[in-house]
Amino acid sequence: MTAIIVVGAQWGDEGKGKATDILGGHVDYVVKPNGGNNAGHTVVVGGEKYELKLLPAGVLSENATPVIGNGCVVNLEALFEEIDGLEARGADASRLRVSANAQLVAPYHQTIDKVTERFLGKRAIGTTGRGIGPTYADKVSRIGIRAQDLLDESILRQKVESALNQKNQMLVKLYNRKAIDPEEIVRYFMGFADRLAPMLIDAELVLNQALDEGKSVLMEGGQATMLDVDHGTYPFVTSSNPTAGGACVGSGIGPTKITSSLGIIKAYTTRVGAGPFPTELFDKWGEYLQTTGGEVGVNTGRKRRCGWYDSVIARYASRVNGFTDLFLTKLDVLTGIGEIPICVAYEVDGKRFDEMPMSQSDFHHAVPVYETMPAWDEDITGARTFADLPERAQDYINRLEELSGCRISYIGVGPGRDETIVRHDVLAGK
């Protein structure tokens, strides 16, 4: 039995898709336990680049069964567009399965997302406008629509009418928008029912039975630790729990069955959207990291904010997620830059913080305390063992490992699946 959780250790976009793609070829199931089509993965296979949004990266594996878990919110229109796009390129998405308990994104969720974000003005969160937050809000308010509801049109109609009884009041009276016809929403959903029905499974049962039979499951978290609604930089966060604990909830796999918690972390730091970011760069190096690293959002096209490696965040993420291993990505981007600053602590009003400040205000005003290390000039994209790396690159990794409180088991030296150094194999349990 092997159950591995893959979690972003920063603000997302760390390269989780590559990590999942590498590991997904050796497991039986790859599960997406949280999020929706608001966050994407870029995976390079055989020189071909695939930009995945709602689908688990494991959909490109020849062996694994990809599963959208109960903790996800699913935009069916986006789901089938993505499937059709993959199949047009020769990929096989026929093994995809969807938890019957996954929540569905309705058109009115997207409307509410955009309207409320606009009304926040300067206090806007920086959402993608895809209705993810409002869908999760309905889930918690117990007026959400689940995938299984499309199997019974009568139940679906009752739930849509109940949800719109509240939402139409808000749209008309508060936001001066036109009321939404419940029948229009029912027709929208039922238009996907026949295609969705064969994909629906009792995911909790299927995944746990697979583990009991000695099979392997990989849980591919969306977003990242610092965007977790409980443990991230609230309120500039997502609406779910993209931490290791959230993966258990969003898949139905209990914590005692987890064998590894793998944190994906970039050799520097990036962030999309609003919110505090202590190591953010506004100089030529920020532009260099953005350009050289190709730091543009897969799903949004937004340029990512860039900064140096933040070991305070790395230690925090290791603690919150119980990481057993780290997968360091994009090390090659730092080649030839002279000196590499590493944030080892923060300073707030003259006080040093070696760990994450407790308060939002302190974190917002945190000034990074840096130490520097010399970079390397050699091309490292051909390295396949740790010994292949230049000594300075090895020193940098060893220092990050020391500062982050967790061993670095995988090192990405390029975007390709094969451009990876494996020091410890989590699949082998060593």
Image: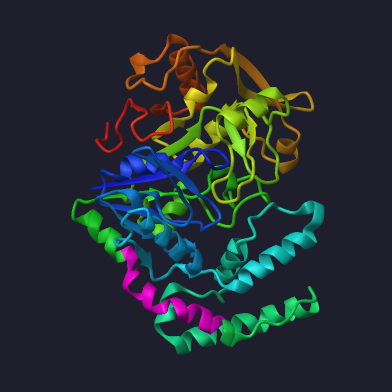
Residue with the most extreme bottom position: 154
Residue at 39% in and 58% down? 251
Above or below: residue 198 compared with residue 367 = below
Residue 164 is covered by the magenta coloring: no
Residue 195 counted in the magenta span: yes
Location of the C terminus (image quadrant): top left
Q: Which stretch did the figure color magenta?
A: 185-204
- Looking at the image, is 173 positioned above or below residue 117? below
Camera-nearest residue between 245 and 85: 85
**Left/right of residue 394 with respect to residue 351 in the rendered view:** left
Is residue 203 visible to us here? yes
Q: In this view, does 340 lie above or below 324?
A: above
Could you tell me residue 304's position as x and y percent?
63, 39
Q: List x then y, in percent, for residue 170.
A: 74, 77
Q: Is residue 343 left or right of residue 170?
A: left
State whether residue 259 appears in this view. Answer: no
Above or below for 356 versus 115: above
Say how the picture is coloured: rainbow
Q: Position of residue 62 (x, y in %)?
A: 26, 49
**Principal SS element in the magenta part?**
helix
Picture coordinates of residue 124, whole percent (x, y):
75, 54
Q: Which residue is drawn at 45% across and 18% down?
A: 398
Q: Residue at point 66% right, 28% down?
A: 286
